[in-house]
Image: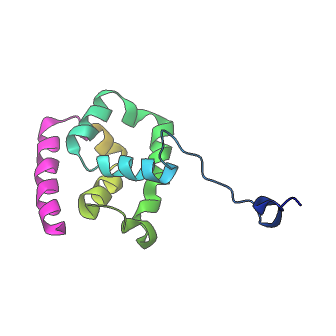
Amino acid sequence: MAEPSATATEPQKLEEPLYGGFTRFELELEFVQALANPFYLNYLASQKILQDPCFVEYLKYLQYFTTPEYVKYLSYPGPTLKALELLQQERFRHDILIPDVVGRLAEDTVLASVEDR
């Protein structure tokens, strides 16, 4: 006598697709935390990525990390959220090319990281 399949009696669960073995959330979390690095922001600006309207929309989408439901996943919420906030401003997306701006932001990031711990 054949046994009934477990999937025949249970509803099928939709599995989230993986990208290189990671969920979309894991990739977005890693990326949003990388935005706390002023030197990385400078690199993105130098490659004109911060001027791309699609990328600017993606930055708006990433604002979900500012909600309590998701902020708890950030290793360094202070610098990460500050960078995400600054990136919403067109002026900042241009100013991050200025070495003094990068240096000042790097200093602020180090101080905030120490305070977060």
In the rendered structure, the answer to whether residue 61 lies left or right of residue 29 reads right
Number of on-image labels: 0
**Along the line of sight, which residue is nearer the eye, 19 or 94?**
19
Is residue 17 or residue 70 the one in the foreground?
Answer: 17
How far across and down, in percent of the image, does residue 11 sit?
Answer: 77, 64
Residue sitting at the far bottom: 68
Name the residue located 60 percent from the left edge and 52 percent from the top edge.
16
Locate residue 92 relative to residue 29 in the image: left or right: left
User: What secondary structure is the stretch in magenta mostly built from?
Assistant: helix
Can I make out residue 88 in this image?
no
Q: Is residue 81 left or right of residue 109?
A: right
Q: Which residue is pictured at 69% across the width and 60% down the height?
A: 13
Asked if residue 47 is positioned above or below residue 35 in the image, the reply reads above
| Name of the residue lying farthest toward the front | 1
Near-viewer residue (114 or 100): 114
Occupied quadrant, residue 40: top left
Q: Is residue 105 magenta?
A: yes
- Name the image quarter holding residue 100: top left
Residue 98 in the image, given as x and y percentages of width and height: 18, 36
Residue pictured at 42% horizontal, 61% vertical? 65
On screen, residue 55 above or below 109? above
Report whether 53 appears left or right of 66: right
Q: In which quarter of the image is residue 91?
A: top left
What colour scheme was applied to this rendering of the protein?
Answer: rainbow
* Image quarter hosting the N terminus: bottom right
Q: Which residue is the extreme one toward the top?
A: 47
Note whether residue 76 is visible: yes
Residue sitting farthest toward the right:
1
Q: What stretch is highlighted in magenta?
A: 95-117
| Residue 39 magenta | no
Image location (x, y in percent) of residue 39: 20, 39
Q: Say which residue appears at 44% left-offset and 58% top-offset.
A: 63
